[in-house]
Amino acid sequence: MINRIFIKLTTIFSNRKYVIALLLLLIVSVALAVVLSQTNNKIQSQASAELSWDEYVAAKDTYIRMAKKRDPSFALDNLREQIKKDDKLSHSCHAIVHEIGHEAYEMYGSFSKAMQYQDELCNSGYLHGIIESIFSETKDILKTMNSICGTSTVQNFANWQCYHGIGHGMMFFTENNLPDSVRLCEVYKDTFAKDSCINGVYMENFGVDQDSHVSAYVDKNRPLYPCNEKTTFYKEDCYVYAPTYYLFVHKNDYKGALRMCRDAEAKYRITCASGVGSQAMKENINNPKLVERFCLTGKISQIGACISGMATLAVNHYGSTTPVRSLCKDLYFFNRGACLQAVEKQEYLFK
C-alpha cells in the first residue's frame, strides 16, 4: 500500500508542470493570506472624508464663479488640479462638475456652445449636467433625445458618455420615475445607445439627492431594492449601482456593502461587488491602493470583481485607459490580472 502511494507521488512530482503549478498556488495562497490578515476594519477610517454640506456649497459656488468670470474650462482645469491634493474635494468632484454643466447651459442657452468646453473630468459630469438641464425644460422629449448626441452611434467613449448622460436627463424629465425613464431609453433602436442610456438612468436613481431630488425607487431599509424585484428589468445596471446608495447611507462601509452584495440574486452578486469597487474608487480616486484593500475585505469570490469595478471607474474618471494601466501595475500581483482585464474590456471605446 505504502509503495503504491510512494510510486504515485513520485510520478506526480516528477512532472514539472505539476510542481510549478503547486508552487504557484502555494505562493499566491500565502501572499493572499498575509494580505488578508493585515486588512481589517481599521482601514475604513482611512477612507476619504467628504465635504460637509456647507463646504460643498462653498466649493460649488467657487467653481461656478470661475466659470462665469472666465469660462467653464477655466473652472474645470482649476478643479482638476485641486482634486489631486484635496481628497475631500475629489470625493464630490462628479457632483460639482454636474453643477458646472448646469451653469454652462444656463450661461450659453445652447447645447453646442456649452459643449465647446466639454471635459471628461470626473466621469464626464460636465456633459451630464448640461444634458440634465436640457431635459428638465424640454417640451418634446423624443426630438431632444434623438438630437443631442447627433446621428452617430459609433461605439466610442464620447458617445457612451453622451447617451449615458441622456439617461441622467431622463430622470430629470420624468421627475425620477425609474420605469418611465427606462421605457424612454428603450425608444432607441440602436442597442449601444439604449444600453448606455439605461445605465445612466440607474446611476441617477441610486445617486439621487433624497432632499431635493427624491426617488421612490431607493429604500435605505432594503438596499437592493428595486434590483431584486421580479418586475425589474436590466438587473445588471441596477445591481452595479445599488452599492452607491448603500454607501450614501452607510458612509465608507465598503465591507458592509460587499456583505450586502452576498444577498443579491446569485447571478448578480459579482456585478454588485464590481459596483462596490467602482464607488469606492470614485470616493477615493487619489488612493487606489486603499481601494484595493477595501476590496480585500470581501469574500475571495468578490475580490476580482471589486478590482474590476475600481479599474472601470478609473477609466471613466480619466477618460483614458493609459493611466489606469499604470495603476494596475501598482496593485498586488494577484490583483493585476483582474485590473488589466477590465481595462482591456474598455479599449474598444478609445479606438
Image (spheres, rainbow, N blue to C red):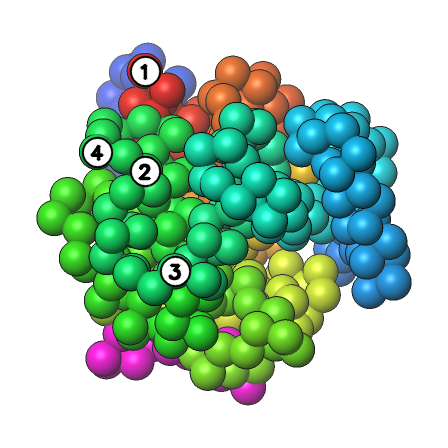
Mark 2 or mark 1: name the one nearer the start of the chain.
2
Q: Quadrant of residue 293?
A: top right
Instruction: Residue 113: say if magenta.
Output: no
Q: CA distance from mark 3 to mark 1?
A: 33 Å
Residue drawn at x 49%, y 77% is 215
Mark 3 or 2, which is nearer the eye? 3
The mark nearer the N terminus, 3 or 2, is 3
Bounds of the magenta segment: 221-232
In terms of sequence position, does the residue under pointer 3 or pointer 1 come before the other?
3
Please tell me whether the stretch drawn in magenta is mainly helix, strand or loop.
loop
Quadrant (top left, top right, bottom left, bottom right) of the N terminus = top left
Question: 304 left or right of 67?
Answer: left
Q: Mark 4: which amino acid?
A: Thr
Split into 4 quadrants, where in the image is the C terminus?
Answer: top left
Q: Residue furthest left?
A: 189
- Residue mark closest to the camera, 3 vs 4: 3
Q: CA distance from mark 2 to mark 1?
A: 19 Å
Is 329 rendered above or below residue 62?
A: above
* Residue 59, visible in the rendered structure: yes
Label 2 sits on a secondary structure element that is: loop
Residue that mark 3 sits on: 138
| Residue 77 image-quadrant placement | top right
- Report the amino acid beneath label 2: Cys
Q: Is 187 above or below relative to 308?
A: below
Residue 114 screen position, x and y as percent:
54, 35
Local packing at callout 4 (Cα closer than 10 Å; few below 14, some 14-19, many 20+) is few
- Three-letter amino acid code at the position of disc 3: Thr
Q: Amino acid at mark 1?
A: Lys
